[in-house]
Amino acid sequence: MVLGQTAVANRTKTFQAAVCVLNSLQNNAAVLERLRGHQENPGFQLQAMHGFLHRTGITVAELDKLNIIHVTGTKGKGSTCAFTERILRTHGFRTGFYSSPHLVHVRERIRISGSPISKQLFTKYFWEAYGRLEDTKDAHGGTMPFFFQFLTLLAFHVFLQERVDLAVIEVGIGGQYDCTNIIRKPWVCGISSLGFDHCSLLGDTMEEIAWQKAGIFKPGVPALTIRQQASPLRVLQHRAEAIRCPLWVCPELDQYEAMVGPVILGLAGKHQRSNASLALQLSHSWLQRYKVEERGDGLSLAQAAYTPGCPAVTFQPSAAMLKGLQETEWLGRNQILRCGSVAYYLDGAHTTASMQACVCWFRQETLQRDQTQGPGVKILLFNTTGERDSAALLTLLVPCQFDYALFCPNITETTSSTVNHSVSVCVQHMLARCRDNQSSWQGLNATGTTNQHHRPLVTSSSSHSQVFPCILSALQWISGREALEPAPAGLFSSSVPPQSTGLPVRLREAGHVSVLVTGSLYLVGGVLKHLESEISTTGDHCDQSLGS
């Protein structure tokens, strides 16, 4: 009898059934709330991970065979991973890449050679891993992993079974207590830009956050970081010394360009330059280790590649490295999707630093568009989740001079199930938050902030800022369709009434429209899902770019 077969023998083991079971596991929002209640033992989820790994049939020693690159940070860790994976894939290696969150399909989180695993592979490996856990849960107090824990286990299982040459693993939250930190012997670690996020879990100072991120350091394993602020950098250095982990600071991308000329990046935005530099160092480190392993001379990577105590060495990037940087794609980050006269600028920025970078990118892109096509209409589609400071993020967006600001929850569309009482209460809470965001925006633009025509950028009129019940209704308004799907009866309370969705004349007559979708990766994912669905249904063509 195959382990994991009995508990799921009577279950239809399809892809859809796998997704339903996965969604039944405790979601990440509930887990974050639970983690806040376990501050006296913040490592409990990582401790539990060891048990789940064993029950899945994987040993920690087997993870060593994955030749892992482990990356954390507050901003840019996903982009850094994407650059790194693409560089090494361009070198001819079979790569595994685990990231979060997904934007449209859960399979996006687990990639083989750059592509999300197929439905067939996802289904096969899901039921293998889930069956083993379900078969053993009675002997372990009925415990099962939560959503992110299970997907991490599944990624390890997939990469081992598919025999990847290496795995690029993005940390979920923090580092020290993140469930990916069950990794014992990565080949190299990286830290992207540090900033404030998940402060209730990681601490409310840069030094505390740096301590958490440095938790992925391992004895003797090289670690690389971009240039950080002085105080958090000292924390990284002190932790590296205590752990006996060699740590180097990456050079600026300019130093590589002094040798090879302009470096073209597949991801837009000046902030991507530091991510690209970190990716060059991580991939170079991995390749050095790979050469050492092939030689079998026993030299450590630190001995082979660096002089301890000095900044990371600037080397001449190979043609494959430069090609990898140029061909990197990372959906939902500085992504442009053009559908007719409407251009969607998608960036899941949700921290102060990432929003500053997003604003810089959007203003530069729309300035170029206005110069070539004439002045157009600018629309903001915004939402936030969790403990994000919406007002602070909206303040940063004011200089973009939006003509209209739209707010909606991260609900793809309203259905009859939305009126379920427990769901309805949750929706009411999300809509109330959208109303708060709208009020903040109106307040910011009613305090005298004007554009070059000396008029308020957004007035308190509902025709200039609106709250929609779901992503679909907001997209329909933008595209000019009057026949909107009505919200289910009873969805809105008297405190959150539906708003007029009539299309303004200015928007109807606009030569071109630029829509910035930001504040939440989940919002970006919902927009991508609808645009992808519309393209496949209508056959309409959208041009996509992830660069400038």
Image (cartoon, helix red, strand yellow):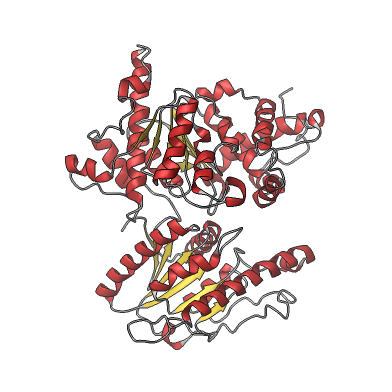
Pick the front one: 323 or 232: 232
Residue 18 quadrant: top right
Q: Is residue 177 left or right of residue 77?
A: right
Residue 170 position (above or below residue 268) = above
Residue 295 quadrant: top left
Pick the front one: 124 or 406: 406
Q: Is residue 256 left or right of residue 132?
A: left
Q: Is residue 186 visible?
A: no
Residue 503 position (above or below residue 387) = below
Q: How many discs mark residues in the rendered view? A: 0
Residue 439 position (above or below residue 43) = below
Residue 394 position (above or below residue 46) = below
Residue at point 43% right, 34% down? Answer: 237
Residue 402 x %, y %: 42, 76
Assign the C terminus to one quadrant of the image: bottom left
Pick the front one: 183 or 266: 183
Residue lying furthest top in this view?
Answer: 297
Residue 367 x %, y %: 30, 71
Residue 93 quadrant: top left
Residue 27 x %, y %: 68, 49
Residue 413 x %, y %: 62, 67
Q: Is residue 411 left or right of residue 348?
A: right
Residue at point 45% right, 30% down? Answer: 240
Assign the N terminus to one quadrant of the image: top right
Residue at point 62% right, 25% down? Answer: 58
Q: Is residue 456 visible?
A: yes
